[in-house]
Amino acid sequence: MLQRVVKKWKKLAIAPGNSSKKLLQKTHGVPKGFLAVCVGEETERFVIPTTYLHHHAFRVLLGEAEEEFGFRQEGVLRMPCEVAAFERTLEMVQRLKKQLFCWGSSGR
């Protein structure tokens, strides 16, 4: 489901009639496997690994973004939450990823 959401968002973002030049300017420098998102009313920009989108917390945020903005967003994906809450979510997911990596690599 998440892959469909991201694919559909990408297609709509670069579709004719959308400001694709603006999209390219704003997402310039985003490496493969990452996604640029803008968070909160301040529209603070974050570049996150796309693997984070599989985490339950990000699924909830994507659902809220769909409800508030729909799929027809121009430019980077907008997340309708406070920057501080998004940063806490990022920290939590990063900690969990590190724990899983360390746990998985200790058995060698």
Image (cartoon, grey):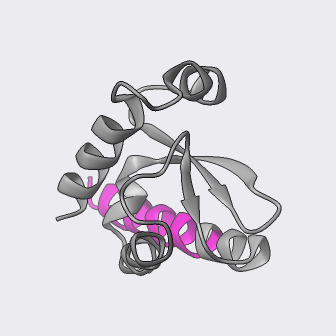
Residue 34 position (above or below residue 60): above
Quadrant position of the N terminus in the picture: bottom left
Q: Position of residue 40 (x, y in %)?
A: 73, 68
Q: Residue at x 24, y 44 (%)?
A: 7
Q: Position of residue 8 (x, y in %)?
A: 25, 47
In the shown orientation, is residue 19 left or right of residue 58? right
Residue 99 colored magenta? yes
Q: Position of residue 17 (x, y in %)?
A: 42, 28
Residue 70 position (above or below residue 82): above
Q: Nearer the viewer, residue 107 or 16?
A: 16
Q: Nearer the viewer, residue 104 or 32?
A: 32
- Count of numbered badges drawn on the protein: 0
Q: Residue at x 38, y 77 (%)?
A: 63
Residue 31 colored magenta? no
Q: Residue furthest front?
A: 17
Q: Residue at x 78, y 67 (%)?
A: 41
Q: Position of residue 81 (x, y in %)?
A: 65, 77
In the shown orientation, is residue 20 left or right of residue 86? left
In the shown orientation, is residue 41 left or right of residue 92? right
* Residue 25, image quadrant: top right
* Residue 102, image quadrant: bottom left
Q: Residue at x 78, y 76 (%)?
A: 84
Q: Which residues are magenta?
A: 91-108
